[in-house]
Amino acid sequence: MLPQRVTIVEVGPRDGLQNEARPVATADKAAFVRRLEAAGVRELEVTSFVSPRWVPQLADATELLGQLRRPAGVRHHALVPNVPGLERLLALPDEARPQEVVVFGAASEMFSRRNLNCGIDESIERFAPVVARAHAAGLVVRGAVSCALGCPFEGPIAPAAVGRVVGLMRGIGVDHVGLADTIGVGTPGRVREVVEAAAAHYPLTDLSGHFHDTYGQALANILACLDLGLARFDASVAGLGGCPYAPGATGNVATEDVVYLLHGLGIDTGIDLDALADAGAWISERLGRPSASRAGTALHARRRLPT
Ligand code: HMG
Ligand code: MG
């Protein structure tokens, strides 16, 4: 039984724009978020409160959120690696403050060190006060687990390693967990094993998938997750994305492609696919390159055909 409704968390403004070589103006980021919201996207990972030395692309997090007026029913998310990051987020006025904080760890020790400058266990120690203070402020906390299917430095990752870090996240009170294929190497059978390892610690309703599409497996992996009962996926319009600390990783699965798949299966997303494809075309033009979304490109080509 497939779910009747799936929640898409649009991560283009964060996962997408964190990986852009050329700076994107804050006003363009705000316009991008507004277009996504106008297309019916209700959950958006807008930015990160990380060190600007590590990710200069998102150094304008406070300014960007200050420029946005969140429409009713829309939830904003932001990555937060440590207490200083949470303090920056909490300094925002209520109406600009994201409702969901994402602490991001890894199932790979080497990736954790490259991305966070500390090992897995130490990352959990750093996240613990972030979770406690975020909860005290009434925020929801998601835990992202990078390299759940493979690591650019360590190679294949055992599902037990994923289970271990998911259990540690449970131990510090993280509300729900996203399993991330950072370098897009997973295939459906392996994805099933990883979801099962995580499901020892969280109900399936509190697990989500985040698939980079490096090897073209993301939609197949999403379908495998749907079969297991997951109903929440991250995706990035126009297939933007990547992690500056994950060499070889390409963009996330394109939101337009995921929405096309879900609507084709009769699953409701609340998203207007044509308006979403327009948002994807708009940001691709601003970034000066073609969209990586197959569905987005096809929809635009069809509009140009004589009727
Ligand atoms: P560190 O260098 O060990 O930290 O980095 P530090 O405490 O020594 O601080 C270094 C400098 O950064 C200091 O400034 C701090 O004040 C400042 P200085 O004294 O040199 O001027 N600083 C901060 N400034 C603002 N906000 C903060 C903050 N923290 C420190 N929050 C740290 C440790 C965690 C900070 C660093 O490693 C970091 O920021 N890493 C983030 C890397 C990142 O954002 N990666 C991409 C996101 S993860 C991802 O894309 C994967 C995902 O999509 C899922 C998937 O696909 O796998 C989620
Ligand atoms: Mg990612």
Image: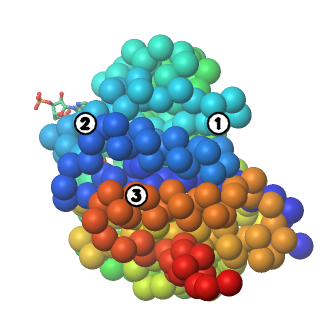
Q: Residue at x 89, y 73 (%)?
A: 1
In this figure, which colouring scheme has been used for the structure?
Answer: rainbow
Say what secondary structure mark 1 lies in: loop
Q: Which residue is mark 3?
A: 283
Q: Which residue is mark 2?
A: 59
Residue 20: in sight, yes or no?
Answer: yes
Residue in front for this viewpoint, 112 or 243: 243
Q: Quadrant of the C terminus?
A: bottom right
Task: Name the image quarter holding residue 277.
Answer: bottom right
Query: Quick check: 75 above or below 1?
Result: above
Residue in front for this viewpoint, 267 or 175: 267
Taking the view exactly as shown, the residue that stands out farthest to the right is 1
Looking at the image, is mark 2 or mark 1 earlier in the sequence?
A: 2
Looking at the image, is mark 2 or mark 3 earlier in the sequence?
A: 2
Say what secondary structure mark 2 lies in: loop
| Dot in front, 1 or 3 | 3
Q: Under 8 Å from ligand 1: the CB of mark 1?
A: no
Mark pair 1, 3: CA separation:
20 Å
